[in-house]
């Protein structure tokens, strides 16, 4: 697939992101009030990682479609689904978990923002390749 962000570049950037975030999470959750939530933080990291990988490969495939509206629809649906899933998970965990989980919320929202920024930059690169082609 020809686009500005080829698979190799994406996978290297993605691996670096996950590696850096893993180190930050490990260090952050090694002390203080964050310590009890280490497993939950790494589960969240894995979930966001899987979502980003899937989004990239679907976006790369859709970007070569003749209908450019499919790419826009993919961005809208994925953003809405991720936001709805996040709100739902935070709402449920607020109802089911003890109040000291606020430290996990901080980690979760931070991961959400980092991965959202990463996904937006990746999708913008793919969109530029569509614009050059069309």
Image: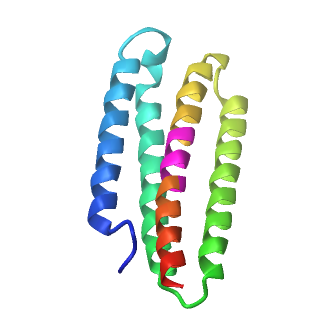
Which residue occupies the foreground of this view, 103 or 98?
103
Which residue occupies the foreground of this view, 119 or 86?
119
Where does residue 50 sit, x and y in percent of width and height?
43, 55
- Specify whether residue 40 is painted magenta: no
Q: Which residue is drawn at 59% across and 34% down?
A: 109
Way the structure is coloured: rainbow
Which residue occupies the foreground of this view, 102 or 28?
28
Q: Residue at x 50, y 40 (%)?
A: 114
Which residue occupies the foreground of this view, 103 or 121?
121
Where does residue 53 sit, x and y in percent of width and height?
41, 60
Q: What stretch is highlighted in magenta?
A: 113-120
Where does residue 31 sit, x and y in percent of width and height?
39, 11
Image quarter of the N terminus: bottom left
Q: Which residue is drawn at 53% across and 69% down?
A: 127
92 horizontally vs 50: left or right: right
- Specify whether residue 118 is painted magenta: yes
34 horizontally vs 112: left or right: left
Q: Main secondary structure of the magenta part?
A: helix
Give the residue furthest to the front: 132
Query: Can you say whether 118 is above or below 134 in the image?
Result: above
Quadrant for residue 131, please give it: bottom right
Query: Can you say whether 20 is above or below 119 in the image?
Result: above
Image quarter of the C terminus: bottom right
Quadrant for residue 38, please give it: top left
Query: Can you say whether 97 is above or below 130 in the image?
Result: above
117 horizontally vs 98: left or right: left
Query: Can you say whether 17 is above or below 52 in the image?
Result: above
Quadrant for residue 104, please give it: top right
Give the residue furthest to the bottom: 66
Q: Which residue is drawn at 50% across and 54% down?
A: 121
Where does residue 92 sit, x and y in percent of width and height?
70, 38
11 horizontally vs 113: left or right: left
């Amino acid at each position: 697939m020809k686009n500005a962000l080829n698979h190799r570049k994406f996978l290297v950037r993605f691996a670096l992101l996950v590696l850096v975030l893993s180190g930050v999470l490990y260090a952050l959750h090694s002390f203080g009030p964050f310590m009890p939530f280490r497993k939950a933080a790494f589960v969240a990291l894995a979930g966001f990682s899987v979502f980003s990988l899937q989004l990239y490969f679907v976006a790369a495939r859709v970007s070569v479609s003749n209908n450019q509206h499919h790419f826009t629809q993919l961005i809208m649906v994925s953003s809405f689904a991720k936001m709805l899933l996040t709100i739902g998970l935070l709402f449920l965990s607020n109802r089911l978990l003890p109040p000291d989980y606020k430290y996990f919320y901080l980690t979760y929202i931070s991961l959400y923002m980092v991965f959202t920024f990463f996904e937006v930059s990746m999708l913008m690169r793919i969109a530029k390749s569509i614009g050059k082609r069309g």
